[in-house]
Structure formats: structure tokens, C-alpha cells
Image: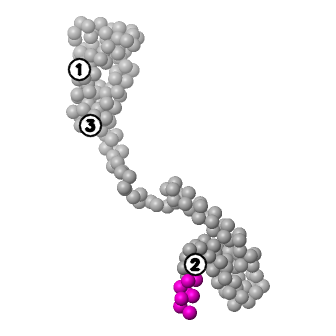
């Protein structure tokens, strides 16, 4: 080991941070080159070298000087690269570009869809609220609670026919409120058909 590195190592072992920084400067290029050759990627090599110097700093008191500091750093760098590659292979993933469609498009996963769904729920709730209570009750019992017409009639004290008529009228009003352009278009088509 060159004398100047030996002096820096001795000072670093005694707690001199600037001596360790000088050791890093003196050996960084070789450690990075080794890490790059082992990982094949610049970003990964930088991560490996950073981890290697962190380990070297923490383990500096254990450095016995049997080999040169550079050789010791090579060993640490190779070990860090090996650990990094094992970890990377376990956590392998592909980068997604903006054009990639998410496999799971449930509203609770996609914030934009969740916001749209919340907006639609508000619109539907407002439209339901605008219905007269007798029509609203029929829609809720049929479309929310999925009750059959005869159960709705019994619940509201009306005939089954009346329940069907109210449901039809309520749905028509909801459609007109929620989809006004479609309701106008449907109205124009039925006027032309007459």
C-alpha cells in the first residue's frame, strides 16, 4: 500500500473524516469501474459504490491492513454488487410509459376514475332527490334494493301495475335529468316517427 494511503487509512481509523474523504477520492474511479462492470448499469453502479463506501466507513476499525485499502474496497464493492444484483433480480420490474394502460381500472385504484365516479354519484343523488317522494321510493326499492314489483307494491300500498308505471315514469325523469341531450334526441326521433 502506498505510504500516503497508509497514512490516510491510519488517520481515518482514528476518526478523521477528511482522511476518509481523501481515501474515497483516491479509490472512487476504480471502485466505480468495478461496480459498473458487475452491474452493467451506471445508476446501479453509483448505488453499489455508495453502499460500498458506507460499509467501508462503518467497518474501518476492522481493516487490518493485510491487503491494500484498494483491494479491501474491491472486495467490499464486489460483495455490495452481488447483494444488489440478488435484490434487483427479486424486485425486477418494467418501466411503464404514459401510453401503458393499467390492468386494473377500478375507480378505487385510478384517482381520475375515482373522481369521475364521485361526480357521477353526486349527479345521480341530485337527480334522485329531484324526484317526487313516491317515484323516488319506487326507484330506490327496485334499482337499489332489487325488490320485485309485487314487493314494492305491497311495501308502498299500491297495485303492482301502479308500481310499474311509477318506476317507468321515474326512470324517464332520471334519464331526462342525467342525459338531457339524449332525451331531446329521443324526443325528436319519436316526433319524426309520428
State which mark lies toward you, 2 or 3: 2
Tell which circle, 3 or 1, labels the residue nearer the N-terminal end. Answer: 3
Could one spot residue 193 in this view of the protein?
yes
Image quadrant assignment for residue 149: bottom right
Outermost residue to the bottom: 194
Q: Badge 3 is on which residue?
A: 41
**Which sits in the foreground, 83 or 19?**
19
Magenta span includes 188: yes
Q: Residue at x 59, y 61 (%)?
A: 119
Q: Residue at x 39, y 13 (%)?
A: 17
Q: Secondary structure at mark 3?
A: loop
Q: Residue at x 39, y 10 (%)?
A: 16
Callout 2: few (<14), some (14-19), or many (20+) C-alpha neighbours within 10 Å?
few
Tell which circle, 2 or 1, labels the residue nearer the N-terminal end. Answer: 1
Image coords of residue 140 (percent x, y): 68, 74
**Which sits in the foreground, 117 or 184?**
184
Q: Badge 2 is on which residue?
A: 184
Q: Which residues are magenta?
A: 187-194
Image quadrant assignment for residue 55: top left
Residue contact at pointers 3 and 1, CB within 8 angstroms: no
Query: Is 5 rendered above or below residue 165?
Result: above
Q: Whole-Å distance between the Cαs marked 2 and 1?
A: 82 Å
Image coords of residue 38 (percent x, y): 23, 34
Q: Whole-Å distance between the Cαs marked 2 and 3?
A: 61 Å
Image coords of residue 56 (percent x, y): 34, 21
Image quarter in which the N terminus is found: top left
Q: Give the number of the disc on residue 71.
A: 1
Amino acid at each position: 500500500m502506498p505510504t500516503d494511503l497508509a497514512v490516510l487509512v491510519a488517520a481515518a481509523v482514528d476518526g478523521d473524516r477528511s482522511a476518509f474523504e481523501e481515501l474515497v477520492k483516491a479509490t472512487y474511479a476504480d471502485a466505480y469501474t468495478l461496480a459498473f462492470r458487475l452491474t452493467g448499469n451506471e445508476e446501479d453502479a453509483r448505488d453499489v459504490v455508495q453502499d460500498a463506501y458506507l460499509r467501508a466507513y462503518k467497518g474501518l476499525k476492522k481493516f487490518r491492513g493485510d491487503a491494500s485499502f484498494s483491494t479491501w474496497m474491491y472486495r467490499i464493492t464486489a460483495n455490495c454488487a452481488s447483494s444488489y444484483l440478488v435484490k434487483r433480480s427479486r424486485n425486477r420490474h418494467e418501466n411503464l410509459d404514459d401510453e401503458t394502460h393499467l390492468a386494473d381500472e377500478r375507480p378505487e385504484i385510478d384517482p381520475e376514475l375515482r373522481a369521475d365516479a364521485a361526480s357521477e354519484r353526486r349527479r345521480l343523488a341530485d337527480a334522485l332527490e329531484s324526484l317526487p317522494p313516491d317515484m323516488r321510493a319506487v326507484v330506490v326499492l327496485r334499482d337499489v334494493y332489487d325488490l320485485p314489483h309485487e314487493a314494492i307494491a305491497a311495501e308502498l300500498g299500491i297495485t303492482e301495475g301502479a308500481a310499474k308505471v311509477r318506476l317507468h315514469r321515474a326512470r324517464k325523469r332520471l334519464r331526462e335529468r342525467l342525459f338531457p341531450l339524449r332525451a331531446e334526441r329521443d324526443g325528436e326521433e319519436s316526433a319524426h316517427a309520428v
